[in-house]
Image (tube, rainbow, N blue to C red):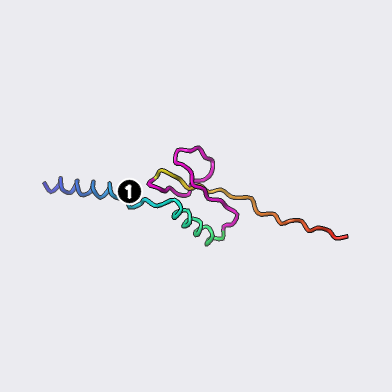
Amino acid sequence: MKTVLTVLAIALFLSSASSWARKPCEELKTEIAARLDAKGVSSYRLDIVAKDSQDERKTVGTCNGGSDRIVYQRAPAQSQPAAVAQR
């Protein structure tokens, strides 16, 4: 009887663990952006895409209970406008 109760308790704990990890995408995206900024990363883009979408970008997080992904892409560095020669 003790074994059955232990197994049920473990099963209940594991089934509820995924609900603890559920996080809204915008909140997670903000946290990831803050970490990247703290590391000095610049010129990047984070997008929220569906879990099943075909995407070549790097997945850096999952959100909404695993139904969506946050993907990372380096953006090209902002080029400085060329100085205009004065005559």
Q: Residue furthest left?
A: 1
Check the image and name the residue furthest to the bottom: 38
Q: Quadrant of residue 37?
A: bottom right
Residue in the picture at 40% in, 47% down = 64
Q: Which residues are magenta?
A: 41-65
Residue farthest along the right direction in this orientation: 87
Identity, as a three-letter code, of the amino acid under mark 1: Ser
* Crowding near the residue tagged with mark 1, few <14, some 14–19, many ≥20 C-alpha atoms within 10 Å: few
62 inside magenta stretch: yes
Is 20 on the left or on the right of 5, as rendered? right
Asked which quadrant contains residue 52, the reply is top left
Q: Is residue 41 left or right of residue 62?
A: right
Using residue 14 as the reference point, say whether residue 31 is left or right of it.
right
Q: Position of residue 57 (x, y in %)?
A: 53, 44
Q: Is residue 27 magenta?
A: no
Count every numbered label the image shows and give the total. Answer: 1
Q: Position of residue 48 (x, y in %)?
A: 49, 47
Which quadrant does the C terminus fall into? bottom right
The residue tagged 1 is 18
Residue 59: x, y in percent?
Answer: 48, 46
Kindly identify the residue that appears in the image at 41 percent across and 43 percent down. Answer: 67
Q: In what element is the residue under mark 1?
A: helix
Residue 29 locus on image (x, y percent): 47, 53
Q: 56 or 81: which is nearer to us? A: 81
